[in-house]
Image: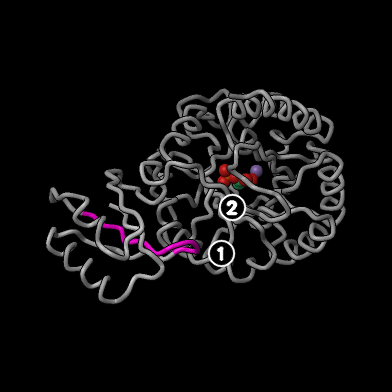
C-alpha cells in the first residue's frame, strides 16, 4: 500500500494514521522524495481502504500488491518524465538519443564527439570515465580529471553528460560534473550504491543486471526511489543467455514489459545489447518501435581505434544515419 501525504498534514493527523495502520498490523516505512512524502505499508490484513483514505492529511492511497511499489504503474498510471532543463525531457513520449564513446579518452576525442553531436542535434553525450572491465589489464578510464575536462567542454557546447558511477565514494566528487548518473549492469544490485543515489538530486539511468530479471531491475529502482530520488530511468542492455553468436541477448520483450509495469522512462542500449556494429542500428530501430523512451548508443570518430568496445561502436557517418532513421520512426511509431 502507498499512502501519499498532504504537505500540510499535522502531527495529530499523523498520529491518527499511525494508530489505524497499527490496528491492521501493517509495517510502515516513511519515504520522502524530491516531490512528496509517502508511507509504504506492507501487511496481509484485509481492510476497507476507504477507512484510511478518508482520514485527514492523506492525498492519495493505493493498494499495490507488487513487491516494488513506488515504481509500479499500479500506483502511478501516467508516465513519469524527467526534466533536464532547456526543454529537454525524457519520458514525455519523445525519443531521446544519448550518444558518445564507450570511454572518454582525450581532450581531442571529447571535442570531436561534441562537434558530431551538435551537428546532429543530439543533446546528451555518454562516455565512461570509470570503466568496469572484464580484465583488470584493460583501460579503466580517465577518472575524475577526465570527467572535469569533459564537463568543461560539454558545458560550452550546451550538451548534457551521462556517465557511470561505480562506487558510493565517487558520487560526491562526480555530482557537480554529471547530469545523469549511470549504474552499470555489474552494479545493478549494488544496494549500497543504489541507496546513495537515492539521496542525490540528479537523474539515474539504471541498467539491467547481466543476468538480472525484470523484477530484480524494478526492485533495484525501488531502492533509489525509496531513498528519495524519483528521477530514474531503466535501461535494457542485453542479458546473458546460452547464445554465443553475439555479445548479449538483447531482450526487446523487456521494453514492452517494463513500459507496462512501471511509469519510469525506459531506455534501450543496442550497442551492448548485441555487441556487433553492423546490427546496432537495426536493434536501435526495433527498440524505438517497441516503445523505448530513449536510445543510448556508442559512437567514435574511429571505432577501430576506440580504447573499449570498438567492435560495437558506430562511426560518425553510421551514427548520423541512425539518428535520421530514429527521427523518422519517432514520428510514426504508435
Ligand atoms: C557501458 O555503458 O559502457 C557499460 C560498461 O555498460 P554495461 O554496464 O551495460 O556493461
Ligand atoms: Mn561500452
Q: Residue 4's x, y, as percent?
A: 36, 58
Q: Residue 289's x, y, as percent?
A: 60, 25
Q: Nearer the viewer, mark 1 or mark 2?
A: 1
What residue appears at the point 62 percent right and 39 percent down from the top-left corner? 294
> Toward the viewer: 260 or 77?
77
What residue appears at the point 41 percent right and 68 percent down from the top-left corner? 7
> Toward the viewer: 310 or 53?
53
Q: Is residue 163 above or below residue 10?
A: above
Q: In the rendered image, which residue does mark 1 sit on?
A: 201
Q: At numbered mark 2, what does the secondary structure look like: helix, strand or loop? A: strand
Left or right of 312 on screen, residue 136:
left
Q: In the rendered image, which residue does mark 2 sit on?
A: 182
Q: Report crowding for label 2: few under 14, some 14 to 19, many 20 or more residues within 10 A (C-alpha).
A: many
What residue appears at the point 52 percent right and 27 percent down from the top-left corner? 252
What residue appears at the point 64 percent right and 47 percent down from the top-left corner? 89
Q: Residue 209's x, y, as percent?
A: 47, 43
* Majority secondary structure of magenta residues: strand
- Magenta span covers which residues? 33-42
Which image quadrant shows ligand 2?
top right
Amino acid at each position: 500500500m502507498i499512502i501519499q501525504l498532504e504537505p500540510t498534514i499535522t502531527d495529530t493527523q499523523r498520529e491518527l494514521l499511525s494508530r489505524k495502520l497499527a490496528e491492521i498490523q501493517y509495517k510502515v516505512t516513511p519515504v520522502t522524495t524530491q516531490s512528496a512524502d509517502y508511507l509504504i505499508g506492507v501487511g496481509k490484513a484485509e481492510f476497507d481502504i476507504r477507512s484510511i483514505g478518508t482520514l485527514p492529511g492523506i492525498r492519495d492511497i493505493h493498494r499495490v500488491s507488487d513487491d516494488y511499489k513506488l515504481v509500479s504503474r499500479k500506483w502511478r498510471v501516467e508516465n513519469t518524465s524527467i526534466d533536464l532543463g532547456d526543454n529537454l525531457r525524457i519520458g514525455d513520449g519523445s525519443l531521446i538519443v544519448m550518444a558518445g564513446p564507450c570511454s572518454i579518452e582525450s581532450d581531442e576525442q571529447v571535442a570531436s564527439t561534441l562537434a558530431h553531436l551538435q551537428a546532429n542535434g543530439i543533446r546528451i553525450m555518454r562516455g565512461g570515465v570509470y570503466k568496469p572491465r572484464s580484465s583488470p589489464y584493460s583501460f579503466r578510464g580517465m577518472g575524475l580529471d577526465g570527467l572535469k575536462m569533459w564537463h568543461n567542454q560539454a558545458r560550452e557546447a550546451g550538451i548534457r553528460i551521462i556517465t557511470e558511477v561505480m562506487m558510493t565514494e565517487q558520487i560526491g566528487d562526480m555530482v557537480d560534473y554529471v547530469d545523469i548518473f549511470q549504474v552499470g549492469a555489474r552494479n545493478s544490485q549494488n544496494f549500497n550504491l543504489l541507496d546513495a543515489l537515492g539521496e542525490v538530486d540528479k537523474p539515474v539511468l539504471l541498467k539491467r543486471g547481466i543476468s538480472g530479471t525484470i523484477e530484480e531491475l524494478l526492485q533495484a529502482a525501488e531502492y533509489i526511489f525509496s531513498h528519495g530520488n524519483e528521477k530514474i530511468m531503466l535501461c535494457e542492455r542485453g542479458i546473458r543467455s546460452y547464445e554465443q553468436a553475439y555479445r548479449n541477448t538483447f531482450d526487446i520483450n523487456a521494453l514492452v514489459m517494463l513500459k507496462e509495469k512501471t511509469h519510469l522512462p525506459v531506455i534501450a542500449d543496442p550497442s551492448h545489447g548485441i555487441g556487433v556494429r553492423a546490427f546496432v542500428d537495426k536493434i536501435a530501430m526495433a527498440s524505438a518501435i517497441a516503445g523505448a523512451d530513449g536510445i543510448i548508443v556508442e559512437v567514435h570518430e574511429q571505432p577501430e581505434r576506440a580504447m573499449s568496445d570498438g567492435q560495437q561502436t558506430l562511426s560518425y557517418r553510421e551514427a548520423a544515419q541512425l539518428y535520421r532513421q530514429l527521427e523518422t520512426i519517432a514520428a510514426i511509431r504508435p
